[in-house]
Image: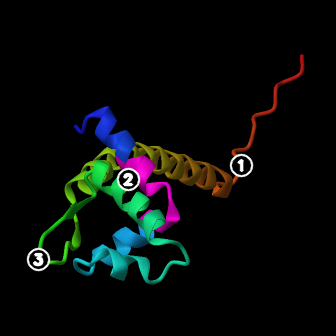
Amino acid sequence: MPSPGRLDATFAALADPTRRAILARLASGEASVSELAEPFAMSQPAISKHLKVLERAGLISRGRDAQRRPRRLEAAPLAEATGWLERYRQFWEENYQALDAMLEDLKAQEARPPTPRKRKKQP
């Protein structure tokens, strides 16, 4: 079970579409800051702020390749968040299965012909 602080940081980092796009790009391999900034209409300092949020959340790490400092995806926090969400998915799946079973029972009851009622004898 991930710590609440780490989970909070992961979800906070994922809340921004730019950061999600950066993670999607890093899923295909490491990239430099300039490569990550390329598709966005924002300044290098703005991209750097997004990268710092992702680094603090543990979602990316900074490597070193001569003069280049490529960023790479770190999957562990995403796996922890997925595990946390999976528990709730299972909960809802069980509820949906129970609802499906109840609806099937109702359909079966509606499909049966009505049972004739016995008439009461009058005195």
- Tell me the residue that label 2 is attached to: 53
Q: CA distance from mark 2 to mark 3?
A: 22 Å
Q: Amino acid at mark 1?
A: Pro
Q: Is residue 68 visible?
A: yes
Q: Is residue 3 above or below residue 60?
A: above
Prevalent SS, magenta region: helix
In front: label 2 or label 1: 2
Q: Quadrant of the N terminus?
A: top left
Specify which label sits upstream in the sequence, 2 or 1: 2
User: Element under label 1?
Assistant: loop
User: Residue at position x 50%, y 59% from top?
Assistant: 16
Q: Is residue 46 left or right of residue 61?
A: right
Q: Earlier in the sequence, mark 1 or mark 3?
A: 3
Q: Which numbered disc, 1 or 3, marks the residue closer to the eye?
A: 3
Residue at image point 20% right, 55% down: 76
Decide if residue 111 is on the left or right side of residue 10: right
Circle nearer the viewer, 2 or 3: 3
Q: Secondary structure at mark 3?
A: loop
Outermost residue toward the front in this view:
67
Q: Which numbered circle lies on residue 114? A: 1
Crowd rating for badge 3 (residues with CA inside 10 Å; few <14, some 14–19, many 20+): few
Q: Which residue is mark 3?
A: 65
As drawn, 75 above or below 44: above
